[in-house]
Amino acid sequence: MNGYCGKMLFVNLTDGALEERELTKEMAKHFIGGYGIGARVLFNMMEPNADALGPDNVLGFVTGPLTGTAALFSGRYTVVCKSPVTGGWNDANSGGFFGPELKKAGFDCVFIRGASKKPAYLWINDGKAELRDASVLWGKDILETEKALQRELGGKQIRSALIGPAGEKLSLIAAVMNDGHRAAGRGGCGAVMGAKNLKAVVVRGTGKVPVADSEQLKAINQEILSTIKNGPAAQMANAFSTFGTTLFTFPSALGGDSPVKNWGGVGAVDMGEEAAKKLDGTALDAKYRVKKYACANCPLGCGAIYDA
């Protein structure tokens, strides 16, 4: 089935059971991927009154049909669960390299329920999955955990989605992080992961995702690149590539859509226009930028490392 591995992994942390299930053509056709498949699986697996921070909540890591292929802008995945913030549906999207690596490791998605008695992480290596003890990782921050996992499992070839101390302590604003700096940040999914005593999902894969017509995909990629460089939005694309989302910091502050002290105030009204200018991308870039980086198959590369 082009664009898919055709496999889903279901994990029960309570009893340690791992089960592979087929992702059928019918399901792929009707729900495509990402939170489409995520919504369907959670609807089937969960009761409406399930405690978001309890073992019956299902936490999913879901990719789409372009993830792991050569398609541009395809390096993303979605975390789905019941939100402990709203009590309703939650999806949080993140870039980086975790999503493509999950596909290359042989799975379109992973769904996790239950809660481990002690800290654990899920290790998926080219189609083989196992739960491992994460007690020595508990309490470590994101970067410390990622480096420790790389030392244990085989260097920078591995990719991980993980939580830090905020998720462990069930902070409702905790994110699921991957690739050091990328966040699935909405809805408290990091707290859901922490409630399950799940420190990380770690993947490594060498497989390839099949596509129907690789030459046509190359042609489409070239058309997209041409539009980015020469199309009507070329100037905006170049600016976004240079400054990332900091490009919108100052305009957001002027429009009142910028938080001050956890939304105790808003934008330039409470921050002041001059202070808001100091957070603008042009000011930050000139003073603090160390280097740029990009997510998988992204020609813009809006990420940057800043050192204050």
Image (cartoon, rainbow, N blue to C red):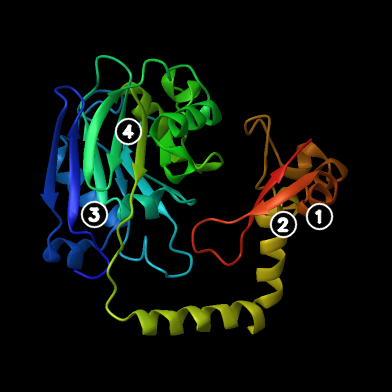
**Which residue in the structure is indicated by mark 4?**
87
Label 2's element?
helix
| Distance between the alpha carbons at the discs numbered 1 and 3 | 40 Å
Query: What is the number of the mark on residue 243?
Result: 2
Q: Is label 1 in a helix, a strand or a loop?
A: helix
The answer to whether 103 appears left or right of 258 in the picture is left
Contact, mark 4 vs mark 2 (Cβ under 8 Å)? no
Labelled disc at residue 188: none
Label 2, label 1: how many angstroms apart (C-alpha)? 7 Å
Q: Which amino acid does label 2 sit on?
A: Phe
Screen quadrant of the N terminus = bottom left
- x then y, percent, for residue 3: 27, 67
Distance from label 2 to label 3 (Cα)?
A: 33 Å
**Quick one: label 4 or label 1, which is nearer the N terminus?**
4
Q: Badge 4: few (under 14), some or many (20 or more) residues near its Cα, within 10 Å?
A: some
CA separation, marks 4 and 3?
20 Å
Mark 1 or 3, nearer chain start? 3
Task: Look at the numbered disc 3 and give the secondary structure of its residue.
Answer: helix
Instruction: State if disc 1 and disc 2 touch (CB < 8 Å).
Output: yes
**Quarter of the figure with residue 100:** bottom left
Residue situated in front as seen by the camera: 149 or 274: 149
Which residue is identified by label 1? 282
Mark 2 and mark 3 in contact? Answer it, CB < 8 Å. Answer: no
Q: Is residue 137 left or right of residue 180?
A: left
Q: Which of marks 4 and 2 is in front?
A: 2
Depth check, mark 4 against mark 1: the one in front is: 1
